[in-house]
Image: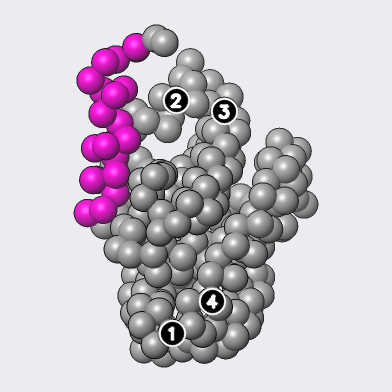
Amino acid sequence: MTKKEALYNYIIQTADNNLILGQRLSELCGHGPELEVDIGLTNIALDLIGHARSLYQYAAEIQNLGKDEDQLAFLRARHEYFNVLLVEQPNEDFAYTIARQFFFSVFNYLFYSELQNSNDSQLAAIAEKSLKEVAYHIRYSSEWMIRLGDGTDVSHKKMQVAVDDLWKYTAELYTMSEVDQLMLEEGIGIDLNKIKALYLAKVEEVMEEATLTIPTNGWTQKGGKEGQHTEHLGHILTEMQWMQRTYPNMKW
């Protein structure tokens, strides 16, 4: 793998995380449990898709094959997406949505905080710009984790079920892939091993306040960074890509 290919894949991997989670959250637009929550989740979805757009624009520039951000976002095959498995998990209920968002937001904040120091000025600028929004994502999801986890017996039980089910996907967030390692050696990417302890500490802090328990069975599930996904991504892409594939080269 050349440096150019690795850089392209690194950018795509980061963009895909944001796009797929943004798509998941957008499914809830108009379906939130209350108006304020509906607006809050929609705003987070817009933030994530905005981050993805900046990254896809840069990836298209690096690839230099005449493709644009829309083609990269909507016209790739399932195995060409490199998002982590966590972000493609469905909105089973509000507890799942919040737990998934919290687990990813903590990582995303730590990731962008380190990426600001990248010797790739474009990636560093995107990271710096995104951080303010991701800080809100952590605050929003953390408050709901605590409110639901330390709430009624029913809300506590639902949150614990969501945590138990989604926790196995979190280790992939800070697991180094071949692309991660290559970009670290070039001074472009970050050392995910460095943020692992920070990630676990922040998650444990909020979980303790929420009176929730982190699973201890050690089971993890990975593969998204290598293009191996759960069945859920296929369903997401079917809906997300329908317009572009049904009406190729459509112009507004």
Whether 111 is among the magenta residues is no
Callout 3: 10 Å neighbours few (<14), some, many (20+)? Answer: some
Point out which mark residue 57 bears: 3
Q: Secondary structure at mark 2?
A: helix
Alpha-carbon span between mark 1 and mark 2 = 44 Å
Tell me the residue that label 1 is attached to: 152
Q: What is the CA distance from the residue labelled 4 to the residue labelled 1?
A: 9 Å
* Left/right of residue 127 with respect to residue 73 in the rendered view: right
Which residue is pictured at 29% across the width and 24% down the height? Answer: 243
The residue tagged 4 is: 147
Against 252, residue 32 (above or below) is below
Quadrant for the C terminus in the image: top left
Mark 2, Cα crowd under 10 Å, few <14 / some 14-19 / many 20+, is: few
Q: CA distance from mark 3 to mark 4?
A: 38 Å
Q: Which residue is mark 2?
A: 70
Labels 3 and 1: the sequence-earlier one: 3
Few, some or many C-alpha atoms within 10 Å of disc 4 (few <14, some 14-19, many ≥20)?
some
| 249 drawn magenta | yes
Instruction: Give the distance between the C-alpha atoms of the residues marked 3 and 2, in whole angstroms.
Output: 9 Å
Q: Real-space Cα distance between discs 4 and 2?
A: 38 Å
Q: Which residues are magenta?
A: 231-250
Q: Kindly identify the amino acid type of the residue bearing the numbered disc 1.
A: Thr
Crowdedness near tag 1: few (<14), some (14–19) or many (≥20) residues, C-alpha within 10 Å: few
Q: Secondary structure at mark 1?
A: loop
At 36% from the left and 54% from the top, the residue drawn is 88
Which residue is rendered at x = 29% and y = 15% of the image? 248
State yes or no: discs 3 and 1 in contact (Cβ < 8 Å). Answer: no
Name the foreground residue: 93 vs 224. Answer: 93
